[in-house]
Amino acid sequence: MKSAGELLRKAREEQNRSLDDVASAVKISKNFLQEIENGKMPNVPGTYVRAFLRDYAIELGLKPEDVFREISKDPELVKILDLKNVSSSASLNVSERVAPNVHVELKKKKKTHQYQIVMVITVFIFTGLALSIFFFRENKISSNVKEISFNEMLKDKEHPPSPAAQIQESSGITSPKSIAVIPDTLVLEGVASESVWVRITSDGKNISETIIPPFVRKKWFAKEEFLISIGNGAAITFTFNGQKIGAFSITRKPVKNLILSPKTIEKILPSNIKQAAP
């Protein structure tokens, strides 16, 4: 056993390989390989030792027959390893027949590992696809929203319309420069003072539901009427066909299913659009 161990150790050292490296390659305990190199018999059945010797020799590029030939010089080892009853071809294939459950288990672990890798890749692909759809929808929504700066908001408050313009607005007369729309088209424009959820249904079929960021302006168009729902009635002010009607609530309460049309606007906010008689 000592001569066989020296043969294996010499081959390993010539290849500048460590015991850890070889043990990892052949899937055999480092302690068993060290005992073999030191000429000691590992405390396992002889069939296992034959398998260890064979796999160790093949890993180092040696012929297993040479290793078993060295061992056969010791009658005691021949008896322990039962080399007389094992043909040369059988000794070469002993690792495939010893402890078959171990090989089956290794194959199962390998398949499980491959399955886990496939699952991780699949999860990454679906996550990336979901994020792409989400950002695409967000960009599509934001592209329909016109942003205005905070300074522009302040300008509107610092420079109120002239009395003539107020009379013009209250009477429903608008100049061509103030609003340019298609005839028989209703225009609803809103400017948010803070983030607010808004749902506008135009003519009972075209639904626009979005969250408008602070100081952002958005327009909606209809032929007959708008159905309006707002998460915070005081967070957005409206202009209807060029007439400023302000917010639909002075508190932060929600507004639900408010119908706005030329027929209902005076009933909804009479104080905002009626001009006092001279």
Image: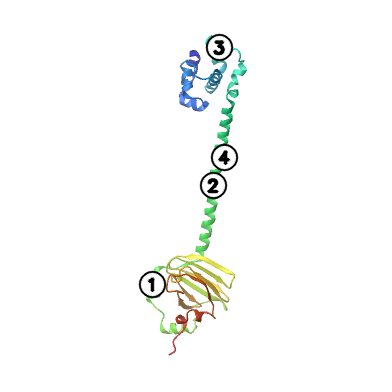
Q: What numbered label is drawn on residue 79? A: 3
Q: Residues within 10 Å of mark 1 (few under 14, many from 20)?
A: few
Circle 1/circle 4 CB separation < 8 Å: no
Q: Which residue is mark 4?
A: 115
* Residue 17 seen in the figure: no
Label 1 or label 3, whichever lies nearer to me, is: 3
Residue drawn 57% across the image and 31% down it: 105
Pointer 2 and pointer 3: residues touching (CB < 8 Å)? no
Res. 207 visible in picture: yes
Residue lying farthest to the bottom in this orientation: 278
- Name the side, left or right, on which 34 lies relative to 47: left
Of marks 4 and 2, which one's residue comes earlier in the chain?
Answer: 4
Marks 1 and 4, the one that precedes in the sequence: 4
Q: Write down the residue under mark 1.
A: 154
Q: Secondary structure at mark 3?
A: helix
Circle 4 packing at 10 Å, graded few (<14), some (14-19), many (20+), is few
Q: Tag 2's secondary structure? A: helix
Give the CA separation, mark 4 to mark 2: 12 Å
Looking at marks 1 and 3 on the same chain, the residue that comes earlier in the sequence is marked by: 3
139 above or below 123?
below
On screen, residue 121 above or below 53: below
Residue 183 left/right relative to 242: right
